[in-house]
Amino acid sequence: MIQDCHTQSGEAATGLILEVFKLNGRLLAEGDKLVAGLGLTSARWQVLGAIALAARAEPVAHLARNMGLTRQGVQRIVDEFVREGFARFDENPHHRRAKLVALTDRGRETYEGAARLQIPWANAVAEGLGAAEIRDAASMLKILRERLE
């Protein structure tokens, strides 16, 4: 039998998802403004951060999977980074064709510059909100993401 109306939780989840869509758009626009002076966009910043925060150099496919993005999209940005001197390809001892992506000094400096811009921005956005409430919201979003993976 097909349900023809949401449960209370389903309706609430739909509302949350719609807000996340709207929030994503605003975050991308704000991120673009925040890091434009560093030669980044939100998409480039996201990939730069994935490279910087990885425990070790990873192939593009692993970076993309960890970010929930397509390999092709991440590959395009990584190729730009290599051309611009933000990243380099290293040999992968486990796979000849899947090179490892590592930041150069320029890439690390750019990532750290973005972090210096993001800290006061995040503090201002979070002003007046409780840290526990923010952590609860993040936990709920993580649960929903994991259910979709």
Image (tube, grey):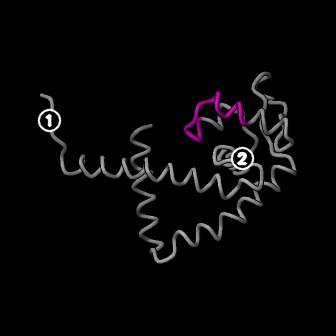
Extreme-bottom residue of the structure: 128
Measuring 73% from the left and 50% from the top, which residue is drawn there?
52
78 relative to 124 in the view: left or right: right
- Between 123 and 92, the one nearer to me in the picture: 123
- Label 2 to label 1, Cα distance in Å? 44 Å
For image coordinates 57% across by 72% down, the residue present is: 124
Q: Position of residue 107 (x, y in %)?
A: 81, 49
Position of the N terminus by quadrant: top left
User: Label 1 belongs to which residue?
Assistant: 4
The three-letter code of the residue at mark 1 reads: Asp
Residue 67: percent from left, percent from top: 59, 41
Q: Is residue 66 found left or right of 15 in the rendered image? A: right
Q: Which residues are magenta?
A: 65-77
On whether residue 70 falls in the magenta region, the answer is yes
The mark found on residue 26 in the picture is none
* Residue 139 left/right relative to 59: left
Pinpoint residue 38: horizontal percent, then vertical percent: 77, 54
Q: Residues within 10 Å of mark 1 (few under 14, many from 20)?
A: few
Q: Is residue 40 left or right of residue 134?
A: right
Q: Residues within 10 Å of mark 2 (few under 14, many from 20)?
A: many
Q: Check disc 2 and give the amino acid type.
A: Leu
Label drawn at residue 48: 2
Residue 2: where, in percent of width, then height? Answer: 15, 29
SS of the residue under disc 1: loop
Q: Residue at x 77, y 60 (%)?
A: 113
Residue at disc 2, secondary structure: helix
Query: Does the stretch in magenta take in 68?
Result: yes
Q: Quadrant of residue 82?
A: top right
**Looking at the image, is mark 2 or mark 1 earlier in the sequence?**
1
Q: Is residue 118 above or below residue 13?
A: below
Residue at 45% across / 75% down in the picture?
130
Asked if 121 appears above or below 18 in the picture, the reply is below
